[in-house]
Image (cartoon, coloured by chain):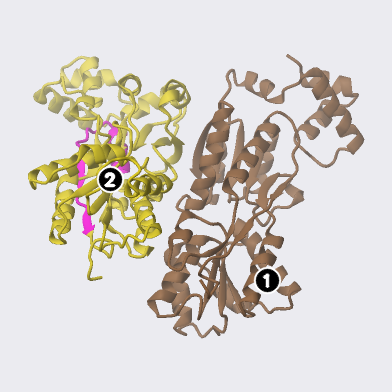
Chain colours: A brown, B yellow
Amino acid sequence: MVTRQEVADRAGVSVAVVSYVLNGRKIVKEETKRRVQEAIRELGYRPNQTARSLKTKKSQQIAVLIHYIGNPFEAGLLLHIEATAKQHGYFVFVQTYDPNREEELRGLLMGRVDGVLLLGPCFSRETLEYFNSLEIPIVSVMQPSTWGERNNVPYVDIAWLPMMRNLISHLRQQGHERIAFMSEGGQNLHYAVRYHAFCEVMRLEGLHTDAAVSRYLNGSGRFEQAKMVLGRLLEGEEGVLTDFTAIVCANDLMAAGCLAACHERGIRVPHDMAIAGCENILMSSQLSPPLTVIDYPRQLAGEAAMNMLLDRMNGITAEPILLSGNLIVRGSTRSNE
Amino acid sequence: MVTRQEVADRAGVSVAVVSYVLNGRKIVKEETKRRVQEAIRELGYRPNQTARSLKTKKSQQIAVLIHYIGNPFEAGLLLHIEATAKQHGYFVFVQTYDPNREEELRGLLMGRVDGVLLLGPCFSRETLEYFNSLEIPIVSVMQPSTWGERNNVPYVDIAWLPMMRNLISHLRQQGHERIAFMSEGGQNLHYAVRYHAFCEVMRLEGLHTDAAVSRYLNGSGRFEQAKMVLGRLLEGEEGVLTDFTAIVCANDLMAAGCLAACHERGIRVPHDMAIAGCENILMSSQLSPPLTVIDYPRQLAGEAAMNMLLDRMNGITAEPILLSGNLIVRGSTRSNE
């Protein structure tokens, strides 16, 4: 079996530099990186085989850590992640991520997985470094907002800026200028990426985003909470000005909750209030009126993320992938439907 | 630490008999079983501690094997299973069950889990015996139809017979006599339990179940498949007589698919066709008309199953639990709504 030392010798670098390249650290010069990757290809070096031989057997398992399994969107992504993993002979197991149990989780995953896929949650820097030192690659579907290049965790997400531009532009065509956004309390979550894109487009369009309304519109990512929060706001209980005529929700469950809150109060959708979601789960297409959504390509994203992780497990570096979404206009924003 | 030998000595039986009792085998006389359980209590014997000490550390992990993670019903059960496990310091990981990979799965779970919870799928007899020999208890939520007392796998489910009686009786009050059932192709699945209860109640009510229709109405447990299958039938493409005026679906996703198929063809629900589901997922309450469903108490079932598994892990035998469901009548079957 080809060793890391042999790769280092061939490339004329130290073993540490080979590790840096394999782990995608940016501190290595492009020219050096190229030489190391060439040596890896020429020698047919497989980093995981080494790691596995130390463990005496392959784990053939991939851990998927999920933010909230109660959202059909995440479950849908999972189906495609699983299918892709299976094609390559891997077992996928899913755990709900709990930031308070990260240390325990590290112990549980150690030696048991060949890779980790994050579906929403964001590891602490300490945990990222821990897996890095074990050469267990991490890939994220849906970029958590506190991540950037700085953590070197590659991700697959959709390009939110152009999608939000399409959505807000559509809402403007329907006569809306005062548009609210419903998100989730946490700031280090993938929904915050969507909110930031929304705010950026609003700014570019010269429209005002009411920070007080945004702060209040915390739907916790759930149907019931969204329904309750918007309901209270519409009834003026909170002393927050509700002069918006359209609401964009970071996920579809919350958009469905907003629709239910409007129905309960006789607020006509889309005539009195336009509502849109950001995922396109099945339910959205079946509501009355059906919801306008940004269609998140679940299959593409699940497959791309799993393939990225398999690449990383084979020592191939990966860059973030931004997929195109698709705006699906339905009755919840278009009054002539 | 108390050993199994000490329990055997105290109870005046062999170590093998202690194992039989711990594993819930029926071959042990009631009186012997009572003596062994008394000895276990008196000595404070904890079977899993032994198993764990052999593994040098506790796994503190429970595997949940799921039939189809794309159904929000199963995901909802999972949330409650996880919450209960967490209260007891356990990690839950979820895997989609694939009957073709059962042997691999055994290898992956061996030494890694303290218990297995089945959410729909059914292990082969060989695998059941394998986990039995490892003293890894198995509990099922939703009884798979090919199981009975014979496998000694305790389960939590709802009592389908009284629930189906309530549902069919309601449909009769609405004037329906020709009632179809949509299920899933596989015969060893939990949906078959629901179908059998349906057939039994139809028989008791003196109503005819059309086997040809039932065979054809295979919605695969999914929305799209259900919509397609019912759609084709309604268009007379299949040469199957569609003289039914009501359809009961083994899960809500299929019921939603049937509703969509009717909407597309201008078939009025409930006037021309009544539709009911068996789970009560969120979507069902938000459709137009909202779906009449048997409400499966997810929280109770998830908690009860997890507690049953924890008991089994502590050597306490468990009997099947049948919970009460609740019929929720909504617009999809009640014409005056």
CA separation, marks 2 and 1? 50 Å
Residue type at numbered disc 1? Ser
Which chain hosts label 1?
Answer: A
Q: Which mark is residue B304?
A: 2
Label 1 crowd (10 A; few <14 / some 14-19 / many >=20): some
* Relative vertical location of residue B213 with respect to residue A284 in this rendering, above or below: above
Query: Magenta residues?
Result: B304-327
Q: What element carries label 2?
A: helix
Identify the secondary structure beneath mark 1.
Answer: helix
Question: Is B296 located above or below residue A25 in the figure?
Answer: below
For image coordinates 66% across by 60% down, the residue present is: A193
In the image, A294: left or right of B234?
right
Residue depicted at x 36% and y 29%: B49
Q: In the image, is residue B72 part of the stretch drawn in magenta?
A: no
Question: Which mark is drawn over residue A169?
Answer: 1
Give the percent coordinates (x, y) of residue B247.
25, 51
Q: x, y percentage for residue B17?
A: 20, 18
Q: Mark 2 lies on which chain?
A: B
Q: Which is more foreground, mark 2 or mark 1?
A: 1
